[in-house]
Amino acid sequence: MKKIYKTITALLLVCIMVIPGSLSANAAAIAFATDYATLKTAIDNKADTIIIMNDISLADVISITYDVTIASNGATIYPASGKFHFNVLNSSDITVTFQGVILDGNQICGGILTYANAIIDGAVIKNCVSSGNGAIYGRGRLTLNNCEFINNRSTSYGGAVVATAPLTVNNCVFTNNNAGAGGGGAIYAEYTTSITSCTFTGNVAYKGGAIYFGWENSSSSSFSYQLTLLNVDFLSNSAGYGGAIYAQGFIYANHINFTYNSAGYTGGAIYFIANGSIGGKYIYYTNNTPNMFN
């Protein structure tokens, strides 16, 4: 998969023919953006597709309230200090598609905050820093398709993703994300979660090097949601508890590989608290230390 860098030369040629000048007050279907002002104008005017022509540094977070595609041939968007790149707001269902665009937090902040029921497709998000919001913070139902998360860091929970509503993740890569002294180096998920055809490599946290599934500070008996894992690889993730996964509730797994994950205390592959368990088939454990479970 894994990175999405689609060639958009043909699209640019179409853009040139469709939009002879700068974006007008009545937005065209396709718009160009060369800086914060033109990107914000394009989104405010609800352009269907926005072509990022060069690297852009944002002056403030930009709110998205409609379905949009943001595309380029590899341009990078940097956030304003202390801000997300984008807030996805207001509508109950929004799809934001990225093609060849990199969201780089530049080690100051960055990422996407979603209040809507959002689908994020094709995002490459790296170097984002937060105090517990993740590079993507999903407060509504969240679906991530074809995304890549690299070197994102939180001081508490969810180095790459924090989901406080149902979460679906398809065909994504999580590499070297870190949740510090908290949980979920890559993902912190509190409700029903489904992860399909994904790879987690080198992620780190105190609880759940790759995934923390459950409610922090809750009693184990109150948690009844399911984590579904289909065709997922966990390689060289590490934590104090649960080198790959720290979990409450039930995990259903099919075609899963746990390889070279490690825990400083216990649960080289998985650490279950009280009511946690795993079932399914084709689950393979290879060289996880100090042991498979808690």
Image (spheres, rainbow, N blue to C red):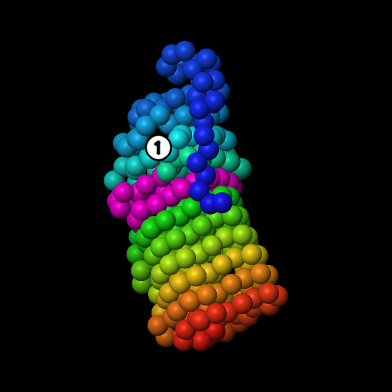
Among the 4 quarters of the image, the one containing residue 182: bottom left
Outermost right residue: 281
Vertically, is 153 above or below 257?
above
Q: Does residue 37 appear to the left or right of 283 in the view shown?
A: left
Q: Does the magenta stretch include residue 16?
A: no
Among the 4 quarters of the image, the one containing residue 285: bottom right
Q: Residue sitting at 63 percent across and 80 percent down?
A: 277
Segment tinted magenta in the rendering: 103-130
Q: Can residue 234 be seen in this view?
A: yes
Q: Residue sitting at 43 percent across and 13 percent down?
A: 21
Q: Does the magenta stretch include residue 127?
A: yes
| Mark 1 neighbour density, 10 Å: few (under 14) some (14–19) many (20 or more) | some
Q: Looking at the picture, how far across and down is residue 6, in whole percent?
A: 53, 38
Label 1 residue SS: loop
Q: Observer-nearest residue: 91 or 258?
A: 258
Among the 4 quarters of the image, the one containing residue 62: top left
* Residue corresponding to mark 1: 75
